[in-house]
Image: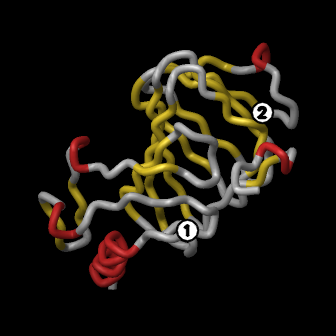
Amino acid sequence: MIQRSLRARAAILPTAAALMVGLTAGVAAAADLPYRGDGHIMLTPDQLQWTDIASMAAPAEIAVIEGDLTKAEPFTFRLRLPAGYRIEPHIHPEYERLTVLSGTLHFAHGETFDRDQAHELPAGSVAIMAPGEPMFGFTEVDTVIQLHGTGPWGINYVDPADDPRS
């Protein structure tokens, strides 16, 4: 039963493309994976496929590693944020679990963007935010973060004018 569930989850990887939150997902094709079987996915950084994100302002990029963000299933993705990037106040419908892989993310809880309220999260830091809780952030250097959780995933901006999809 568990093995069948893991195989089903791995089979979704090549098909995750159009996502509920308007993300344009770049997912490694099954043939490009160095190892895929028995529910395992193993990738090296050069195998990630980075694409633009409709729900975040350019030039942020996303690489979906696993999962279909439109479904109630586990997902993992990375965001690449350039120096000087600003993440406007927003909420998510599910828990957000974030790990800073490189660079530094300045992140805070709140409905109003306030740089002075942000906590400095250097590489190796983690943050866990509850569903429906407003948050915002920014970078001063190029930063890569990894998010994982259970979908369906989405993002709603506190101020609809901040939403690049509108």
Rendered location of residue 95, percent (x, y): 65, 53
Q: Which mark is residue 109?
A: 2
Rendered location of residue 132, percent (x, y): 79, 53
Q: Residue at x 73, y 28 (%)?
A: 108
Residue 64, quarter of the rendered image? bottom left
Quadrant holding the C terminus: bottom right
Rendered location of residue 86, percent (x, y): 66, 29
Q: Residue at x 50, y 47 (%)?
A: 147
Name the amino acid, label 2.
His
Q: Is residue 42 above or below residue 99?
A: below
How are the colours assigned in the image?
Answer: secondary structure
Q: Secondary structure at mark 2?
A: strand
Q: Residue at x 64, y 53 (%)?
A: 55
Separation (CA) of disc 2 from disc 1: 26 Å
Name the amino acid, label 1.
Leu
Which residue, as the protein is rendered here, is positioned at the far left?
A: 34
Quadrant holding the N terminus: bottom left
- Which residue is disc 1 drawn over? 19
Q: Is residue 152 above or below residue 119?
A: below
Task: For marks 2 and 1, give the one nearer the viewer.
Answer: 1
Q: Is residue 53 above or below residue 141?
A: below
